[in-house]
Image (tube, rainbow, N blue to C red):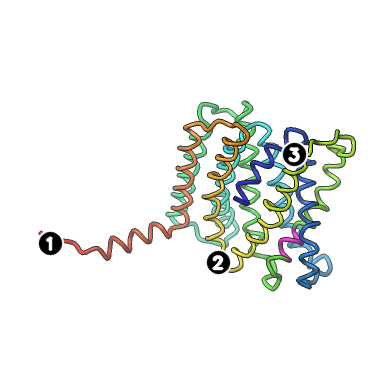
Amino acid sequence: MLWGGSFFFNGVILRELPPLTLVLLRVVLGTIILLPLLRAARIEFPRGLSGWAPFVAMGLFNNVLPFALIVFGQTYIPSGLASILNATTPLFAVVVMAAAGEERLQARRVAGVVVGLIGVAVLHGDALGFESRQGIGILLCLAGAFSYGIAALVGRRLPQRVPPLGTATFQMMASAVLMAPIAAVVDRPWSLPMPHPSTWLAVLGLAALSTALAYIVFFQILQRSGATNVMLVTLLIPVTAMLLGYLVLGEPIALREVIGALVIASALLLIDGRVLAWFSRASASTPHTIR
């Protein structure tokens, strides 16, 4: 719900605010919410450029780039479709990790990436060229997912001694610093008309629930259970996002989106490997009748 809700909140906010202002509000308010918690937990700030460098990199690839790319993508495509494309993140993470020499590219994972690409092709439907509005939106969201894939690599280089709350706060602070001048130059937020109260509620929900709290949970899972379990969370995001988009925003759910989501979910399970391993063990433990 925390991650899937972000696509719903984006859909509401984009009716009145431009994309970069949305991203700026998300990371600034997220930082404001997290800082008192950081102070209460007595977590020390990083020192010097070397101390901040990994968090700046994480803020760039895990927040600034994907947030902006996906939000721009949502100006072209429905929130549900954007969430399905976001679920391709583990596919890109597999490729990035292999290219960086962090993980061996096993046959099972290659097959998972191929199946995932088939799922993306299903989502693309008959818009085979990226010159269409849908094609542009899909390309932007896939670029955001690729950025998240790079963030998975950067996340492995974060200091392990820093608690999840610290990691979430420091990368959010870096994101706010990076995003502020860009949004100021492009959108000139101070010149925009005052949004409706419902839009501000969506901004607050996006910052508090889908950003501050979501990242605390994200880094907690990453630290305790590893990247594999974090990856499987992406299976649940499209369900929430598509339902909220359909029930609240009135966005239709196309059959190809459901089929594409199922194909991508199959790809993620294939990459993870634990479901296949379970079936293999179950098959091996089943007694076979000799005829």
Can you identify the residue that label 1 sits on? 290
Residue 12 versus residue 236 in the image, above or below: above
> Marks 1 and 3, Cα distance to the nearest angstrom?
68 Å
Whether tag 1 and tag 3 are in contact, CB under 8 A, the answer is no
Can you identify the residue that label 2 sits on? 225
Mark found first going from the N terminus, 1 or 3? 3
Between disc 2 and disc 1, the foreground one is 2
Is residue 169 found inside the magenta-colored segment of the image?
yes
Bin the neighbour count of mark 2 within 10 Å (Cα to Cα): few under 14, some 14-19, many 20 and up. few
Percent position (x, y) of residue 212?
Answer: 71, 56
* Amino acid beneath label 3: Ser
What residue is rendered at 59% in x and 63% in y?
221
Whether tag 2 and tag 3 are in contact, CB under 8 A, the answer is no
Is residue 215 found inside the magenta-colored segment of the image?
no
* Amino acid beneath label 2: Ser
Viewport quadrant of the C terminus: bottom left
Percent position (x, y) of residue 193?
Answer: 86, 33
Identify the disc placed on residue 198. Answer: 3
> Marks 2 and 1, Cα distance to the nearest angstrom?
42 Å
Q: Nearer the viewer, residue 277 or 248?
A: 248
Bin the neighbour count of mark 3 within 10 Å (Cα to Cα): few under 14, some 14-19, many 20 and up. few
Q: Left or right of 72: which side holds 222?
A: left
Residue 48 versus residue 118 in the image, above or below: below
What residue is rendered at 63% in x and 51% in y?
148
Mark 2: secondary structure: helix
Tally of marks: 3
Q: Left or right of 120: which side holds 78?
A: right
What residue is rendered at 71% in x and 64% in y?
167
| Rendering quarter of residue 141 | top right
Q: Nearer the viewer, residue 182 or 105?
A: 182
